[in-house]
Amino acid sequence: MNQIELTLLPSTLVDLAQLVSWEKQAEVEEFILPNTYQQHVDMMAQDNFLYLSIFQSDRLIGFLILAIEAGGDIEFRRIVIGHRGQGLGQLAIQAMEYYCLEHFACQRIWLDVFDFNERGQHIYRKLGYQEFKRCQHGEHQLLFFEKHF
C-alpha cells in the first residue's frame, strides 16, 4: 500500500476562492461558521493567522487555519478538506502538528468542536487530543480539546 504524502504550503489569495467554495458545502458548513472571501483576506493579512493549503501531489485538497498565540500555543481554527471520507483530514492534522513543531516550536495545539460533530471528536481523540473544557454556544456546546508537545 502506498503511503499518502501531503504537503502544507502557505495559502495564496488565489487559493482562497476554493476555500470559500468548500466551506459552503453542506457537509462542511454545518460544522463551522463559514467566512466570506473578504473575511478570509482580512484574516490572512494579520500576522497571527496562518493559512496553509494542503496539497496531495500538485492537487489542492484542503486548507488549515491556525492562530499563533504567545507562549508557544497554537489555536487550530479550521480544517476543510475538499473530498471527505478518505482519511486525508487525519493525515493533514498530523502534517500540521509536525509543521507547528518545526516552524514555531509549539508546546500546545488546541481547538474547539461542536458537540454534534462526533466524527471530529473521534478523530481528535484518536490523534491524542484531550478535552479540557466545554461552553455553551447557542443551542449547542463547544468542546475544547488540546494536545501538548
Image (cartoon, rainbow, N blue to C red):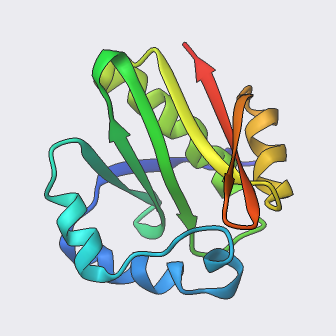
Q: Is residue 136 above or below residue 43?
A: above
Residue at 29%, 81% in the rendered image:
37
Near-viewer residue (34 or 84): 34
In the image, is residue 57 above or below residue 7? below
> Number of marks in the image?
0
Q: Quadrant of residue 74?
A: top left
Left or right, 24 with respect to 116, comes to: left
Question: In the image, 64: left or right of 145?
Answer: left
User: In x, y percent, where is residue 75?
Assistant: 45, 38
From what the image shows, is residue 15 above or below residue 10? below
The residue at the point 46 percent across, 86 percent down is 21
Residue at 16% in and 52% down: 46
Say which of 61 and 45 sits in front: 45
Q: Position of residue 97 (x, y in %)?
A: 51, 31
Q: Quadrant of the C terminus?
A: top right
Q: Is residue 80 above or below residue 135?
A: below
The quarter of the picture where residue 115 lies is bottom right
> Residue 102, percent across and down?
36, 22
Residue 103 drawn at (x, y percent): 29, 26
Horizontally, is 100 left or right of 46 in the view? right
Please report the residue visible at 34 percent of the width from the left and 82 percent of the height from the top: 36
Q: Is residue 21 rendered to the left or right of residue 71? A: right
